[in-house]
Image: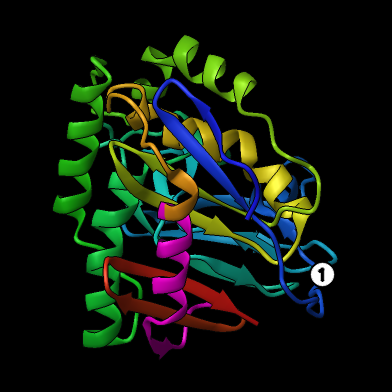
Amino acid sequence: MGDPLSHRGLTLVPVYPTTSAALVPYETLATAIASRHVTVTELNGGSVPELAVQHRGPVPVLLIDGDQVEGGRQNRVVNTTILIPVGVDFTLPVSCVEQGRWRETRVDFSSGEIVPPSVRRGKESSVRASYSRVGAPRSDQGEVWARVSESLTSAQAFSHTSDLSDAYTARRVDLEDTRINLPCPNDGAVGVVAIFGGEVKAADIFDRAETLSEFWPRLVRSYALEAVTSGTGVPDPASLAHAFLTSSAQATATLNTPPGLGQDIRLSGSGVRGAALVH
């Protein structure tokens, strides 16, 4: 781990690799959309829990749990981390984060913010249960909407369509201030542990530093959306992060077959619940 970085109640502890690993080539969803390698649209005219992805790029595409896409008939969030194979038409499991809209604002979707930790936690619980029950990463849509409502209220954001993105808009100045004051280490770190409200709220760890660097601004804003109203930091964040990572390493792992490439691993242990994609 690296030295903690703190600003406005949010502390980030960089995580570094202990071993080298064979790197699988891929690009992120945001990069793939910008490069026109991927097009995301409504599936068959509109299905709340699914979107259609047409992938014609040269390498697989990585979507992480919490990735938002904006457009179509309503904004959505990706249910779990997925690696989409090359050259496929893919059905993407998603949840709605804009309850009050069901009309098309644009045909396709753009890449949006990453949802805050509380929304991810609520969604992960139901996705975990769905994997056990039906072998697919489906969410409890009502639970997701409830978490979105809490985020809008906490951000003091009014939204005609109960759109989570309006929370980010309402807190834009605070979020950008935090992002600027918590720059990505860019020194080989591959992950980050986010601490606020007196405890670890999230950890995001990748296979390479370049991926962390690309996701960093959106990850920081997602943490900051909740951290700016959570109060002060903790006296020894490094010890807290170390204990969390130790518990994660000792957690019980359950294997699932996800859509796309690799294996989905659900972790459950002392104070830890999470997921990983391994390929």
Amino acid at dot 1: Pro
For image coordinates 65% across by 82% down, the residue present is: 279
Up/down of 259 relative to 255, above or below: above
Residue 152 lies in quadrant: top left
**Residue 176 horizontal/vertical position (percent):** 55, 17
Q: Nearer the viewer, residue 146 or 192?
A: 192
Q: Is residue 253 magenta?
A: yes
**Residue 28 horizontal/vertical position (percent):** 69, 54
Can residue 96 be seen at all in this image of the molecule?
A: no
Badge 1 density bin: few <14, some 14–19, many ≥20, Cα 10 Å = few
Residue 86 lies in quadrant: bottom right
For image coordinates 70% across by 37% down, the residue present is: 184
Count of numbered circles on the image:
1
Q: Which residues are magenta?
A: 240-260
Can residue 171 be seen at all in this image of the molecule?
A: yes
Up/down of 10 relative to 248, above or below: above
Q: Nearer the viewer, residue 9 or 178?
A: 9
For image coordinates 58% across by 24% down, the residue present is: 179
Residue 158 lies in quadrant: top left
For image coordinates 38% across by 78% down, the residue present is: 266
Q: How is the image coloured?
A: rainbow
Report the side of 255 relative to 163 (left or right).
right
Element class at badge 1 = loop
Report the side of 88 relative to 10 (left or right).
right
Q: Nearer the viewer, residue 16 or 76?
A: 16
Looking at the image, the residue that sits furthest to the right is 58
**Residue 56 horizontal/vertical position (percent):** 77, 63
Q: Is residue 267 magenta?
A: no
**Residue 202 horizontal/vertical position (percent):** 41, 51
Q: Which residue is mark 1?
A: 25
Q: Quadrant location of the N terminus?
A: bottom right
